[in-house]
Amino acid sequence: MTLETGADLRAIRERKPLVHQITNYVVMNETANATLALGALPVMAHAPQEVEEMAAAAGALVLNIGTLSEPWIHGMLRAGHAANGAGVPIVLDPVGAGATAYRTATARRLLEELEIAVVRGNAAEVATLAGEEAEIRGVESMSAAGPELARSAAKTFGCVAAVTGPVDHVSDGQSDYAVANGHELLASVTGTGCMSTAMTGCFLAVQPNALQAAAEALVAFGIAAEDAAAGAAGPGTFHAALYDALAALDPETLDERAKVE
Amino acid sequence: MTLETGADLRAIRERKPLVHQITNYVVMNETANATLALGALPVMAHAPQEVEEMAAAAGALVLNIGTLSEPWIHGMLRAGHAANGAGVPIVLDPVGAGATAYRTATARRLLEELEIAVVRGNAAEVATLAGEEAEIRGVESMSAAGPELARSAAKTFGCVAAVTGPVDHVSDGQSDYAVANGHELLASVTGTGCMSTAMTGCFLAVQPNALQAAAEALVAFGIAAEDAAAGAAGPGTFHAALYDALAALDPETLDERAKVE
Amino acid sequence: MTLETGADLRAIRERKPLVHQITNYVVMNETANATLALGALPVMAHAPQEVEEMAAAAGALVLNIGTLSEPWIHGMLRAGHAANGAGVPIVLDPVGAGATAYRTATARRLLEELEIAVVRGNAAEVATLAGEEAEIRGVESMSAAGPELARSAAKTFGCVAAVTGPVDHVSDGQSDYAVANGHELLASVTGTGCMSTAMTGCFLAVQPNALQAAAEALVAFGIAAEDAAAGAAGPGTFHAALYDALAALDPETLDERAKVE
């Protein structure tokens, strides 16, 4: 299967899918702006009174547990069930799974109660959720073990796992992609992981194959980061340039520039 | 009636009015920074325990339902009643009215229970709230019908309606302004509508005529957007430049540069 | 006692301490990015279910009441008790103390129930909390009375008081520092006070002497502001440049550049 990042970016810009995001307070503005800059339409809504209506009308649903609390988990579950009922794909970002028992348990609960299309996290988060074996080996070894971790997590979760790091590994349990696009300045700005999850939601809204959508999102976001880094003097100017670069992504050149295996 | 955007901007910078904002999570930082850059003082407070004290001490109150939930609606109502009691003008931003029943009902409730000075929204939001007739014609026709929509909404709401878009239309039901300042990059950054609502709050704090205050806010914000776009390479650098441009607005030239009919 | 800002910045970058922040909605992204840019690791978590675990694992805890509500106060108290139990230093930012009775009472409650290492606020906030005498003299006289205010507040609170303004005054009730680093553009961006509190958390995580940590944080942040202002065209570009400048701070030159008495 060949990635078609350029064609799918074109589809995003033409169809402008609504991407419903229930995400954390820290990055709401950032993921909304990244979504807009890519070409989709972000909407943030978390109240139980409206999430079902919003999720069912969306092209994709993004769930992110970065600053979770009980009312928000309640909203995520209601939105998720509505999305599942309406055939709207869900991407889950298990921010901080492993850091506290509450986060780990909440991420597991969302994975169990909802049909998730893609889990997008870093190696530590995904390893925690993928269970004992991964934990025993320790998080330090995870980046080396990226392809295996993604594959094993995908099998455990029964969905696509996208494990991001210096090289991103995306797997559905059978097929895999390794995406080497990106830039180290991404690690110096908070919420860039959350943004890559939002990008995954945008691609899921136009690309029914979740493995392909997840890999394409990381290609597009990684290339934008490369472009943004070119003129940046540090994390602040990189951050501003990242939105410029997302908006300027050229669908014609994305597939050539993709560093994918 | 002639707009006096320059004189009122000068008054904002001299008096530095406190603008109390109960707004959405996505744009809080952005509207606070836009308020500061213009020359006023933003304060965000939503807890029922303190909103009455804060609203009564403010020069204007901004209510924005972009990420609403029950506790926040409760805070908005309490703040709104306190503002009404103290003669503090209120501007309402009905973000997403029409997108979910909850948002439509909440915006209507705020309009009914409180005395609102200005409603600032896009054509779809205002048309939804202005009722059946507008809805029947459909949102697509709204931008063409901008002047009529603003006038009819103003009559329905019994307050000033500011309908923003490529050209902004502001009406009190009898007199109208069309403001053509602005730049298309505004649509590529989330929260620029919310910022224009915050700017409306700033002008309401110094200009007792709500029609004039609403139009002046859109002139000033539109001119800042034009200036910011001049050196911007995309939405990210435009966003940063927008605060520079608001801070650099020259009261001497605003009235000449206003594109108002 | 001589400040060792350079050595402590080096320690922050080497150890990358986790700085747990329970802060306001307006500045969460900003304080997280400032923390990352300096070289530490921010984490935001406010739910009672997880704050104890997070605070106990952190190098410092930052409490900021800028958009407070009952559930958040509950989270702050639980986190604070866990931090105290684990020997994790706490810095408190009493945003808006004096503006409403709720904020004043909440700040006092946190000061009474928790063992706070540093209170970082502006003159009006600290004077309100430091009690009657300060209040009687009025806030206008506070900046002149900065050294006295910091010393008297430190005695009243039984902790270090860091009173920021054009010149910052830091005292433990016996020894004092006056820090003259900084730039007036800081006042044109919302949340720069909150950022300086977050920076104080970063230095507290590596420097056990709270007086020294508080003064060093203000030296480092002030120098970054000076660097950021150099190329800024206004508050928006200054804001972006501030993160670049924090990331580029050179430990070798900080102590020479410090304007400390």
Image (cartoon, coloured by chain):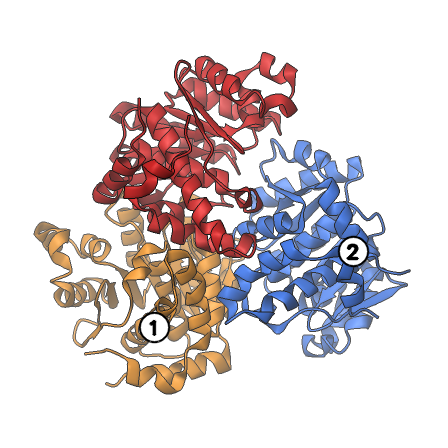
Chain colours: A blue, B red, C orange
Task: Identify the residue at image location x=9%, y=54%.
Answer: C133
Give the quarter of the image for residue C12.
bottom left
Residue C27 on image: x %, y %: 43, 54
Q: What amino acid type is highlighted by mark number 2?
A: Gly
Tag 2 near tag 1, CB within 8 Å = no
Judging by the rendered image, the residue that carries numbered circle 1 is: C217
Task: Identify the residue at image location x=18%, y=56%.
Answer: C127
Q: State whether residue C217 is above or below residue C64.
A: below
Q: Quadrant of the C terminus of chain B?
A: top left
| Nearest to the observer: residue A224 or residue A198 | A224
- State whether residue A96 appears in this view: no
Q: Separation of disc 2 and disc 1 at Cα?
A: 46 Å
- Is A175 left, or right, of B126 in this rendering? right
| Nearest to the observer: residue C31 or residue C174 | C31
Chain for disc number 2: A
Task: Identify the residue at image location x=59%, y=57%.
Answer: A244
| Nearest to the observer: residue B45 or residue B2 | B2
Give the quarter of the image for residue B218.
top left
Q: State whether residue B258 is above or below residue A148.
A: above
Judging by the rendered image, the residue that carries numbered circle 2 is: A6
Q: What amino acid type is highlighted by mark number 1?
A: Ala
Query: Which is more foreground, mark 2 or mark 1?
Result: 2
Give the quarter of the image for residue A76.
top right
